[in-house]
């Protein structure tokens, strides 16, 4: 149980374009989903917290107009990187929390490369 | 001071030995703690969660929590080369956000 999927697993896009990443909880309903970014050899950086049906809460320093998050259902959250630039190239990982347990389960991540 | 601190390592142990990974946290209000394993290029995988003082065992893994000392540890018995990874300690804040605060991770190398 507690499986989280992400799509795509990797994506290459041109500077200035937008990219959408999907995060799905496959066998449970995720009341809360989290989006992280990780640069090489660095730890996870929380970008935002999203609760189903409400606006995402962004961490300090994360541009909400650049990183659009939608959590339309209890099993799906999306992150859209708008007007991507090479410095947005990173490993984006989502996690999901089940209703009851406190554990967060991570998706496999999406590697974004902006050329 | 970081909220969750870990020694970056690398911690090098021979195959079959016990690996001991340590973590301290600064927020006394934290109640839930987690250990994640992350292989290079992959996302974190939950290994253990611990909420109460004392030890919690699961197979070759034992998590230990001491809230008075604000200290969490993970013991890996009979370490295998496949255990070589970065181990992330995380604390959950006692608020409605359910956010996890991660340490920077300890890199473990198990020598064959």
Image (cartoon, coloured by chain):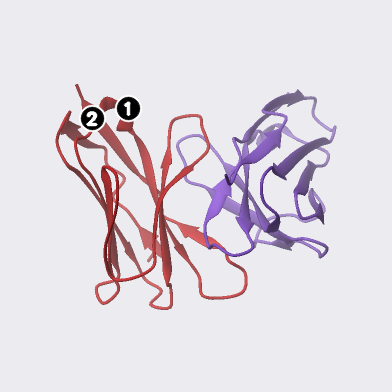
Chain colours: A purple, B red
Is A40 rendered above or below residue A71?
Answer: above
Q: Residue at x 53, y 63 (%)?
A: A102
- Earlier-in-chain disc, 1 versus 2: 1
Q: Residues within 10 Å of mark 1 (few under 14, many from 20)?
A: few
Residue A101 horizontal/vertical position (percent):
54, 62
Which residue position holds label 2?
B110
Location of residue B4 (image quadrant):
bottom left
Residue A90 horizontal/vertical position (percent):
62, 35
Which residue position holds label 1?
B82
Q: Residue at x 31, y 45 (%)?
A: B8
Is B71 rendered above or below residue A97?
Answer: below
Q: Do the CB atoms of the residues marked 1 and 2 lie less than 8 Å apart?
A: yes
Left or right of A80? Residue A88 is left
In terms of depth relative to the viewer, which is nearer, A82 or B43?
B43
Letter of the chain that mark 2 sits on in the rendering: B
Secondary-structure class at tag 1: helix
Is A25 rendered above or below residue A41?
Answer: below
Number of callouts: 2
């Amino acid at each position: 149980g507690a499986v989280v999927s992400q799509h795509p697993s990797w994506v290459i896009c041109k500077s200035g374009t937008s990219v959408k990443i999907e995060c799905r909880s496959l066998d449970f309903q995720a009341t809360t989903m989290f989006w992280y970014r990780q640069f090489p050899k660095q730890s996870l950086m929380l970008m935002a917290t999203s609760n189903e049906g409400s606006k995402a809460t962004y961490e300090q320093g994360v541009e909400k107009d650049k990183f659009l998050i939608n959590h339309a259902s209890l099993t799906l959250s999306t992150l859209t990187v708008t007007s991507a630039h090479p410095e947005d190239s990173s490993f984006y990982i989502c996690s999901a929390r089940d209703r009851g347990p406190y554990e967060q389960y991570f998706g496999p991540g999406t590697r974004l490369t902006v050329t | 001071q970081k909220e969750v601190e870990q020694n970056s390592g690398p911690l090098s142990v021979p195959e079959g030995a016990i690996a001991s990974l340590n973590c301290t946290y600064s927020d006394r209000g934290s109640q839930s703690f987690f250990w994640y394993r992350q292989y290079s290029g992959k996302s974190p995988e939950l290994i253990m969660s611990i909420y109460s003082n004392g030890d919690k065992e699961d197979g070759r893994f034992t998590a230990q929590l001491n809230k008075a000392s604000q200290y969490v540890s993970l013991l890996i018995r009979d370490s295998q080369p496949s255990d070589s990874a970065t181990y992330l300690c995380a604390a959950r804040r006692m608020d409605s956000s359910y956010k996890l605060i991660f340490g920077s991770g300890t890199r473990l190398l198990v020598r064959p």
